[in-house]
């Protein structure tokens, strides 16, 4: 089953990201390995900090079960830390 179908909050996050420019949404962590993860780990890769503020203001991860944990990094930071390759993250948006 596709991640955004299993957890509709991820679909909502991707739809919000589609309203922004140059934002990527990635899933990583236990949700890739378990049907009952403790949390939903999401990486937001951005160029404009205001895009992260916009997503944060939507309060998508405030009260959810499982909770949504968001990490935001610039493209440069992600490349520096090799976060996507190290965590085995899967791209949710853009497809």
Image: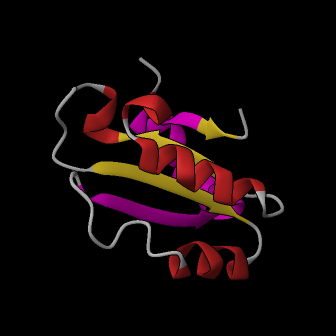
Between 34 and 87, the one lying in front of the other is: 34
29 to the left or right of 13: left
The verdict on residue 71 being magenta is yes
Between 12 and 71, the one lying in front of the other is: 12
Residue 60: x and y in percent read 44, 67
State the residue at coordinates (21%, 54%). Answer: 65
- Report the number of numbered marks: 0
Q: Is residue 82 visible?
A: no
Above or below, comparing residue 83 to residue 75 in the picture:
above
Q: Which quadrant is the N terminus positioned in?
A: top left
Magenta highlight range: 67-91
Q: Which quadrant is the C terminus positioned in?
A: top right
Residue 88: x and y in percent read 44, 31
Q: Residue furthest right?
A: 21
Residue 7: x and y in percent read 38, 39
Q: Is residue 70 visible?
A: yes
State the residue at coordinates (59%, 37%). Answer: 92
State the residue at coordinates (19%, 39%). Answer: 37
Protein image colouring: secondary structure
Above or below, comparing residue 81 to residue 3 in the picture:
below
Above or below, comparing residue 67 to residue 34 in the picture:
below
State the residue at coordinates (44%, 75%). Answer: 59
């Amino acid at each position: 089953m596709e991640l955004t179908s299993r957890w509709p909050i991820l679909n909502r996050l991707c739809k919000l990201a589609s309203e922004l420019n140059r934002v990527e949404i990635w899933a990583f962590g236990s949700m890739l390995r378990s049907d009952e993860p403790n949390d939903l780990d999401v990486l937001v890769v951005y160029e404009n900090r205001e895009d992260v503020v916009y997503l944060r203001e939507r309060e998508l991860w405030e009260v959810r079960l499982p909770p949504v944990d968001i990490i935001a990094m610039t493209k440069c930071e992600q490349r520096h830390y090799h976060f996507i390759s190290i965590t085995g993250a899967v791209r949710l948006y853009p497809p």
